[in-house]
Amino acid sequence: MPSIRPIVLAVIRRGTSLLVFEAHDDVKDETYCRPLGGGIEFGEHSTDALVREFREELDAEITVHALVGVLENVFLWRGRPGHEIAFVYEAEFADAGRYRREEMKILDDPATARWIDLAGFRDGRRILYPEGLIGLLSPDQ
């Protein structure tokens, strides 16, 4: 039986852009973006999980700031049901040089992280998951 998965995601900004990875759902024929992060292990605080995930995914240190919000995401991905509770935090790279990179290879996945302008998510040209995230990000930020 499927279970609810607790995850944590980072809102890392560069000007009007957000750091995301792009993925494709072949069943829906949908390309979407999502901030970096990952699963929270039992007994692990969500902020500790976010720091760990960035070490694993980008070999990068981050500073975690305020909780932006919590989103419940019930979805189908590649035809299979999913259910996540996502803790979303503002965060920043410890190394300012990371902001000069246009792309960053994700080490434990074939994906690449990129800076995507938030305007594309707001006007519907691009899809940002989890649903409701763009509503948590105020237009003036």
Image (cartoon, helix red, strand yellow):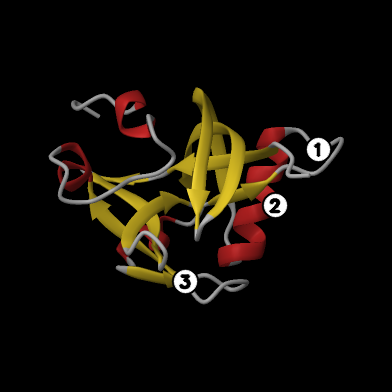
Residue visible at 70% across and 36% down in the picture:
4
Of badges 3 and 2, the one in the foreground is 3
Q: Residue 52 carries which label?
A: 2
The residue that label 3 is drawn on is 111
Q: Position of residue 45 (x, y in %)?
A: 76, 33
For residue 50, side relative to residue 96 (left or right): right
Question: In the depicted view, which residue is nearer to us: 58 or 74?
Answer: 74
Give the class, few, some or many, for how many residues have Cα within 10 Å of label 3's Cα (few <14, many ≥20): some
Q: Which residue is drawn at 59% across and 54% down?
A: 61
Q: Left of 121 or right of it: where is 43?
A: right
Pointer 1 or 2: first along the chain? 1
Where does label 1 land, which residue? Answer: 44
Residue 101 appears at what percent x and percent y? 34, 68
Q: What residue type is labelled 2?
A: Arg
Task: Count all numbered tags in the image, as a single digit.
Answer: 3
The residue nearer to you, when weighing 62 against 36, is: 36
92 horizontally vs 134: left or right? right
The amino acid beneath tag 3 is Ala
Please state, as top left, top right, bottom left or bottom right, where the C terminus lies in the image. top left
Quadrant holding the N terminus: top right
Q: What element carries label 1?
A: loop
Name the amino acid, label 1: Glu
Position above or below: 14 against 31: above
Q: How far apart are marks 1 and 2 (CA)?
A: 10 Å
Q: Horizontal and vertical percent for residue 106?
A: 52, 70
Q: Do the residues labelled 1 and 2 touch (CB within 8 Å)?
A: yes
Instruction: Indicate whether 141 appears above or below 32.
Output: above
Label 1 vs 3, first from the N-terminus? 1
Residue located 51% across and 77% down the image: 110
Marks 1/3: CA–CA distance: 25 Å
Residue 73 picture location, percent across and down: 52, 34
* In the image, farthest residue toward the right: 43
